[in-house]
Image: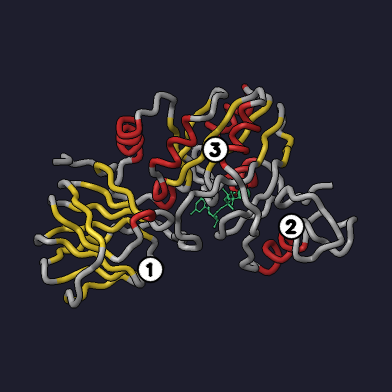
Amino acid sequence: MKCMGCGALLQDTDPLQDGYTPKLTNKLCQRCFKIQNYGANIASQKNIITEKLLAKINREKGFVIFLVDFLNIYAEIITTYQKIKLPKIMVMTKSDLIPRNIKKDQLVKNLKNQYQIKEKIIWVSSKRKENLNLINDILAQENKVFLLGFTNSGKSSLINALTDSNLTISKRANTTLDLLKIKTPTGFIYDTPGFIPEHFLDNMLPKRQIKPVVYQLKNKYCLKINDYYLASDVDNNMILYLANTLNVSKRLKKEVLPKQLEVLANSDIIIKGLGFIVVKKKALITTNIAMDLIEIRPTIIGGKNE
Ligand SMILES: Nc1nc2c(ncn2[C@@H]2O[C@H](COP(=O)(O)OP(=O)(O)OP(=O)(O)O)[C@@H](O)[C@H]2O)c(=O)[nH]1
Ligand SMILES: [Mg+2]
């Protein structure tokens, strides 16, 4: 029997392993029980290997809905999406978090251009139940649908919003651990374990709608985001699309930051797992953030990248 929250095989022998339950007649493993009932913050250590999961799905027949969260889109995510051979669609979820100043349809256009995505992209919110009819239309047409995406993109939340299932949802990575087949009125939808990015910051998800914060940063100042620093060699404007829960302030530059990035005007500096920062002017950016957590792209918000 599989745990109905995360898909792990239920077992009553090793409390330290996934799927443990003291009683095999339970529907949930102990971890899911604790997350669902006490809001426990427990991450599984299971190693989800992207290539293995992709190969498994690519052997199947069916339709793929690939979920992305607009704050966390970067090359690794798009490359993984492109490796899916089944007919597919990209769905940008958590639309309730997208700031009001961003026109969602324009954002979709920018994403399609930037990442050369041929398939349709639609946006939904599981929290506000927005556009769920578009997903229901797909479910009505396809009898076997796989919901794929990186960890925390909101796959299990979407299935819970669409059906009366009780999948485990959490803000930590690695919540769903194996495929779980869920009945829909006309077929099946599969919840799947999230792909795990090679490098990212876990546990930094925003709870409320993002308010982009604009910093006018004179070049003798730097930005402090929790323990991360960013500075520009010229007076610059930076617009932060980050969780409102982060501690952001402006500080005088004191020491030289070890890493350097050259960015064009209107670039996004993506901090994987955190969100992104739009840099308005061409600059040399210095920072203490590890380079494998960072990616630069022309901004998806709009503006000439030069
Ligand atoms: N604001 C908002 N938050 C959402 C939405 N959908 C999911 N979330 C949050 O995103 C986090 C991750 O949700 P999950 O449904 O567990 O994500 P997942 O893709 O199933 O994650 P894994 O099982 O680890 O792959 C949770 O904190 C959810 O509450 C949404 O539409 N809006
Ligand atoms: Mg899940």
Is 230 left, or right, of 194 in this rendering? left
Nearer-N-terminus badge (1/3): 3
When the figure is inspected, residue 44 is found, relative to residue 254, above or below; the finding is above
Q: Please identify, in this view, whether the residue under mark 2 or under mark 3 is nearer the observer.
A: 2
Distance in Å between CA atoms under marks 2 and 3: 32 Å
Identify residue for label 3.
132
Q: Nearer the viewer, residue 246 or 173?
A: 173
Q: Pick whichever, 188 or 134, lies toward us.
A: 188
Specify the quadrant of the image occupied by residue 12.
bottom right
Q: Which picture quadrant has residue 256?
A: bottom left
Q: Is residue 130 above or below residue 152?
A: above
Amino acid at the residue labelled 2: Asp
Measure the C-alpha gap from mark 1 to mark 3: 30 Å
Mark seen at residue 246: 1
Mark 3 lies on a secondary structure that is: helix
Disc 1: CA contacts within 10 A as few (<14), some (14-19) or many (>=20): some
Q: Quadrant location of the C terminus?
A: top left
Q: Is residue 61 visible?
A: yes
Q: Closer to us: mark 1 or mark 3?
A: 1
Which mark is drawn over residue 18? 2
Indicate the position of residue 283 as horizontal and vertical percent values: 14, 54
User: What x and y, as percent, mark residue 221?
Assistant: 15, 71
Give the mark, 2 or 3, whose residue is nearer the N terminus: 2
In this rendering, would 100 be left or right of 264?
Answer: right
Residue at 18% over, 41% down: 303
Q: Residues within 10 Å of mark 3 (few under 14, many from 20)?
A: some
Total numbered circles:
3
Mark 3 residue CB less than 8 A from any atom of ligand 1:
no
